[in-house]
Image (spheres, grey):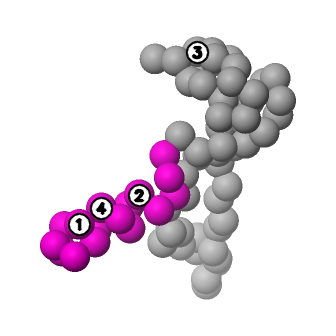
Amino acid sequence: MEITCPYCGFKGKPGDFYYMYESVLYIADSKTLPEERSRPILVICPVCKNGFFLESPYKPLIDRLKERGQ
Ligand SMILES: [Zn+2]
């Protein structure tokens, strides 16, 4: 599998890129609650340092709408 940077066109293996995953912990009564939002992983290009998503963050929503036949 090869990833192509949409900004500078750099092509590399998944191991050549950096990854950032944003996460938030909610604490209630000293317990952590799982986050309800699912967040895509941000891929960062090692050449131009721009971040991009492999998959649209709206894809799960679009899939859900399609399942409902809308
Ligand atoms: Zn790039």
- What is the three-letter code of the residue carrying label 2? Lys
Label 1: few (<14), some or many (≥20) within 10 Å? few
Q: Are marks 1 and 4 in contact (CB under 8 Å)?
A: yes
Residue that label 2 marks: 59
The amino acid beneath tag 3 is Lys
Q: Is residue 63 magenta?
A: yes
Q: Is residue 1 above or below residue 62?
A: above
- What range of the chain is rendered magenta? 55-70
Q: Is residue 15 above or below residue 56?
A: above
The total number of labels drawn is 4
Residue 21 location (% of width, % of height): 65, 48
Kindly identify which residue carries mark 1: 66
- Element under disc 3: loop
Q: Earlier in the sequence, mark 3 or mark 4?
A: 3
Q: Are marks 3 and 2 in contact (CB under 8 Å)?
A: no
Question: What is the CA distance from the residue labelled 1 to the residue labelled 4?
Answer: 5 Å
Q: Residues within 10 Å of mark 3 (few under 14, many from 20)?
A: few
Question: Which SS class for mark 2?
Answer: helix
Q: Secondary structure at mark 1?
A: helix
For the residues marked 1 and 3, what is the alpha-carbon distance in whole angstroms? 32 Å
Please state the horizontal and vertical placement of residue 50, each as a whole percent of the image.
78, 39
Residue placed at 63% from the left, 15% from the top?
A: 12
Reading the image, the residue beneath label 4 is 63
Mark 4–mark 2 Cα distance, whole angstroms, equals 6 Å
Up the image or down, 19 lies above or below 24; here it is above
